Image (spheres, rainbow, N blue to C red):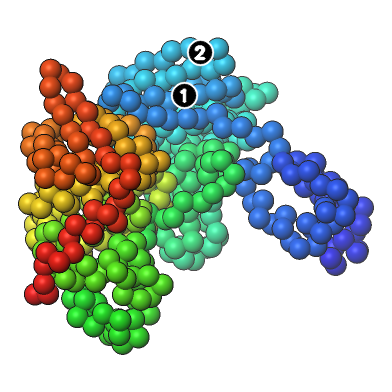
């Protein structure tokens, strides 16, 4: 207000820029209200700028990752020179761009290099010759002439692919830091997307922000917390020995597991208590809820394959590829050990951490078929209540969908699932029918049944203790 009063002509041009470049349509009175409320400050990235479009899309089908680029702003053949990785890929031209094909397993085998690989095509798609990359390049390998990008004699230091946003760096105690000496401490952040324009547009479709993967921070649940919760029940929310931050994160865990409802012991928690919360049956039901609602548990299930040994660095690199900064990525990797030291790891056999600190996911111990039935109905509900599918579809992890199959959650393969599905069909025909004849397979869930109806099957079967 003071600046506008003192320099009306100079400030007016910025008002015009905000109005003319916004994707919103304003009347004069509405625009004045928009500015007076300070709502313009929420447009701190490119998602609300008129005319911006997504140019980079990625999808995986049948083990092949496709990177789809539309209307690229620069030549990928120049940016690919910055990549020092012998990876097989192919490029197919389209009417308005191109599609890159690469093996999903190749990307998964070296996640830190896969991040660099993706950054190459993000930069090719969005580069506007802002010159940040050429300024970052310590060896002068990038030249920009009239918005034409040239990369010559690249030494593969990746400076150009690690764009940085620097605020005061607490490690160097200056306004500038060297990310090669430390991993983005405190307020010093690297842009993992590799390009400022791509980073500004990375939240898709209207800016609906997803919950952070790092939902537990440094306070993943412990066995003694869960034991106290089921012992004290309703009084736990007002009387416990947890610190303020521990309480906040444990309440996130309880809510996502459907064990609490607005800080009250939920009906689902009562059911779990009657079953015995430390049994594989109860833990299996809780895990299904967590994977459906909690982004951190969902990430572990989606990204860690059964029986594969992941080094801590490998997992951190995977999380960095998914857009996390160094500190949250390390917190998620570290939290896995806390989680598998609870009955989820010790009884359900969800996973473990080796003596060397490597992360491993293992096939869960599931003896009650109704747990799988509950998982199927929760899966169907997350997939828009689509209740007919094949076993092949159920087992296919590369399909892009909101629901996570119980086969993925528990590590069950085709040989495990066929007898489970046939057993469920025989015992609970009002819930599920499954047939496997003449190379034809079909699984149908009853339209009039819900996940809650499956939970009702457990009532009265168990007693406390």
Contact between marks 2 and 1 (CB within 8 A): the answer is: yes
Determine if residue 142 is in view: no
Image check: 34 left or right of 334? right
Q: Dot 1: what SS? A: strand
Residue drawn at point x = 34 percent, y = 61 percent: 256
Determine if residue 26 is in view: yes
Residue 409: percent from left, percent from top:
21, 47
Q: Nearer the viewer, residue 431 or 399?
A: 431
Q: In this figure, which residue is indicated by the disc labeled 2? A: 94
Question: Vertical placement of 288 versus 95: above or below?
Answer: below
Image check: 227 left or right of 325? left
Viewport quadrant of the C terminus? bottom left
Q: Using a 10 Å C-alpha cutoff, classify the residue at mark 2 as few (fewer than 14 neighbours), some (14 to 19) or many (20 or more).
A: few
Q: Which mark is residue 401?
A: none
Residue 421: percent from left, percent from top:
14, 38
Q: How many marks?
A: 2
Q: Which mark is residue 68?
A: 1
Residue drawn at point x = 37 percent, y = 70 percent: 261
Question: Vertical placement of 23 versus 275: above or below?
Answer: above
Residue drawn at point x = 19 percent, y = 57 percent: 457
Residue 385: percent from left, percent from top:
37, 41
Residue drawn at point x = 56 percent, y = 32 percent: 54
Residue 410: percent from left, percent from top:
17, 47
Q: Nearer the viewer, residue 32 or 138?
A: 32
The residues bearing labels 2 and 1 have C-alpha atoms spaced at a distance of: 9 Å
Q: Nearer the viewer, residue 351 or 155?
A: 351
Q: Earlier in the sequence, mark 2 or mark 1?
A: 1
Q: Using a 10 Å C-alpha cutoff, classify the residue at mark 1 as few (fewer than 14 neighbours), some (14 to 19) or many (20 or more).
A: many
């Amino acid at each position: 207000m003071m600046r506008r009063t003192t320099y009306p002509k100079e400030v007016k041009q910025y008002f015009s820029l905000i109005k003319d470049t916004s994707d919103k349509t304003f009347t004069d009175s509405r625009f004045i209200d928009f500015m007076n409320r300070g709502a313009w400050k929420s447009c701190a990235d490119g998602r609300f700028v008129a005319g911006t479009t997504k140019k980079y899309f990625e999808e995986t089908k049948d083990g092949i990752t496709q990177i789809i680029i539309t209307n690229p702003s620069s030549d990928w053949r120049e940016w690919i020179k910055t990549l020092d990785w012998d990876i097989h890929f192919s490029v197919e031209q389209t009417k308005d761009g191109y599609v890159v094909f690469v093996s999903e397993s190749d990307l998964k085998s070296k996640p830190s290099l896969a991040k660099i690989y993706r950054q190459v095509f993000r930069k090719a798609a969005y580069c506007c010759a802002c010159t940040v990359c050429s300024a970052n390049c310590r060896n002068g390998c990038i030249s920009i002439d009239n918005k034409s990008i040239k990369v010559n004699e690249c030494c593969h230091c990746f400076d150009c692919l690690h764009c940085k946003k620097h605020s005061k760096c607490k490690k160097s105690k200056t306004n500038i830091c060297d990310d090669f000496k430390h991993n983005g401490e405190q307020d010093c952040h690297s842009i993992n997307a590799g390009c400022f324009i791509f980073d500004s547009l990375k939240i898709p479709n209207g800016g609906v922000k997803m919950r952070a993967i790092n939902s537990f921070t440094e306070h993943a649940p412990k066995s003694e917390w869960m034991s106290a919760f089921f012992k004290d029940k309703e009084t736990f929310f007002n009387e416990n020995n947890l610190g303020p931050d521990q309480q906040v994160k444990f309440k996130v865990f309880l809510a996502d597991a459907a064990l609490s409802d607005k800080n009250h012991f939920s009906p689902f928690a009562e059911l779990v208590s009657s079953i015995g919360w430390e049994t594989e049956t109860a833990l299996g039901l809780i895990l299904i809820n967590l994977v459906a609602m909690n982004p951190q548990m969902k990430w572990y299930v989606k990204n860690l394959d059964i029986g594969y040994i992941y080094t801590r660095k490998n997992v951190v690199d995977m999380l960095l590829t998914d857009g996390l900064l160094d500190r949250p990525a390390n917190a998620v990797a570290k939290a896995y050990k806390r989680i598998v030291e609870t009955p989820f790891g010790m009884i359900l056999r969800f996973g473990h951490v080796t003596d060397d600190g490597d992360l491993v996911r293992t096939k869960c111990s599931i003896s009650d078929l109704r747990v799988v039935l509950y998982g199927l109905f929760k899966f169907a509900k997350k997939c828009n209540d689509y209740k007919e599918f094949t076993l092949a579809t159920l087992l296919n992890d590369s399909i892009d969908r909101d629901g996570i199959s119980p086969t993925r959650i528990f590590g069950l393969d085709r040989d495990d699932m066929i007898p489970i599905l046939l057993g469920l069909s025989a015992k609970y025909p009002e819930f599920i029918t499954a047939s496997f004849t003449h190379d034809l397979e079909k699984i149908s869930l009853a339209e009039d049944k819900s996940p809650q109806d499956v939970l009702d099957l457990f009532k009265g079967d168990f007693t406390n203790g």
